[in-house]
Image: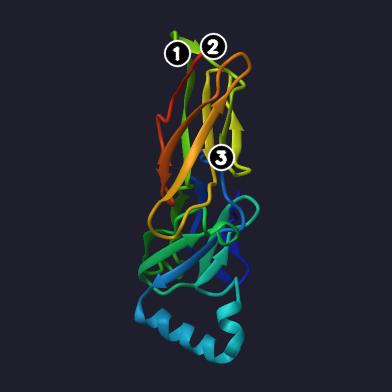
Amino acid sequence: MLELSIVNQQIAIAGKVLQGETEKTISGAIVEIIAMPEKFRAILSLKALQYGSQWEKMSARLDRKMTSIDGYFYFTNLPPGDYLLEASLPTSLNRYKKVRTTAKVSAPVNGKIPTTMTEIVLSPTGIKGTITDVNDPKKLIANAKIQIQDSGDSTISDQKGNYLLIDLKSPPSGQRNITLIASATGYQQVSQTLKIQRGEVISEQNFALIAK
């Protein structure tokens, strides 16, 4: 759990980054302040001069943090005002869309900065649906394999016939055309052609398989 006090510092904004479909926390995400009060902008300008060419390369700065192993991040000693945060996942830039959220820092009360809590949800690129028997829609097919043609991306349907295929590669803009294939023991293979877009999960991409 995030500790809201640090020696000689006061946490002004704190929160966690979550994965949109599983709601699990994400470690290694970058959260950056991209809009801020002028007072904080002036502080950053001085820091940039101090660190020189290393400033842009730093993953941990006054205005840039990386989420910890439990998905939490925090910014300390921020001046009061409105802030705009942007979250991204550097290791999967072509699989997740950047997300922005606002946060307001209040003036100190009795010398203490109130902590503003926030959650940022990163939505992956993906597909989900259900696998059934074409002759009996109520028959849910478990352990069916769903895969993208000519790709290593695949998953298996659960005991209720549901599947979730996420963290798929996608272009920064526009769509990617893919062929999705479903197969299961005792059934004929079925394929569907569709388009995926970064940061969106296509729902109800269902398959009705025909018994051999």
- The residue pinned by badge 1 equals 134
Amino acid at circle 3: Gln
Residue lying furthest right in this view?
69
In the rendered image, the vertical position of residue 107 relative to residue 128, given as above or below: below
Q: Residues within 10 Å of mark 2 (few under 14, many from 20)?
A: few
> Is residue 9 in view?
yes
Residue 39 vs 32, above or below: the answer is below
Q: Position of residue 122 (x, y in %)?
A: 47, 51
Q: Earlier in the sequence, mark 1 or mark 2?
A: 1
Disc 1 and disc 2 in contact, CB within 8 angstroms: yes
- In percent of width and height, residue 119 lies at 45, 51
The numbered mark, 3 or 1, whose residue comes first in the sequence reads 1
Viewer-closest of 21 and 137:
137
Q: Quadrant of residue 68?
A: bottom right
Instruction: State the mark number for residue 149.
Output: 3
N-terminal label among 3 and 2: 3
Q: Give x and y (percent) for residue 199.
A: 43, 50
Secondary structure beneath disc 2? loop
Name the spot of residue 168 as percent of width and height, x first.
53, 47
Residue pictured at 42% horizontal, 79% vertical: 40
Which residue type does callout 1 highlight? Val
Q: Residues within 10 Å of mark 1 (few under 14, many from 20)?
A: few
Q: Disc 2 marks which amino acid?
A: Ala
C-alpha span from label 3 to label 2 = 22 Å
Question: Under tag 3, what secondary structure?
Answer: loop
Residue visible at 61% across and 65% down in the picture? 6
Q: Residue at x 46, y 60 (%)?
A: 115
**In the rendered image of this protein, does residue 169 appear above or below residue 187?**
below
Question: In terms of secondary structure, where does tag 1 sit?
Answer: loop
Characterize the local packing of mark 3: few (<14), some (14-19) or many (20 or more) Cα atoms within 10 angstroms.
Answer: some
Q: Which residue is mark 2?
A: 211
Estimate the spatial distance between the alpha carbons at disc 1 and disc 2, rounded to whole Å. 8 Å
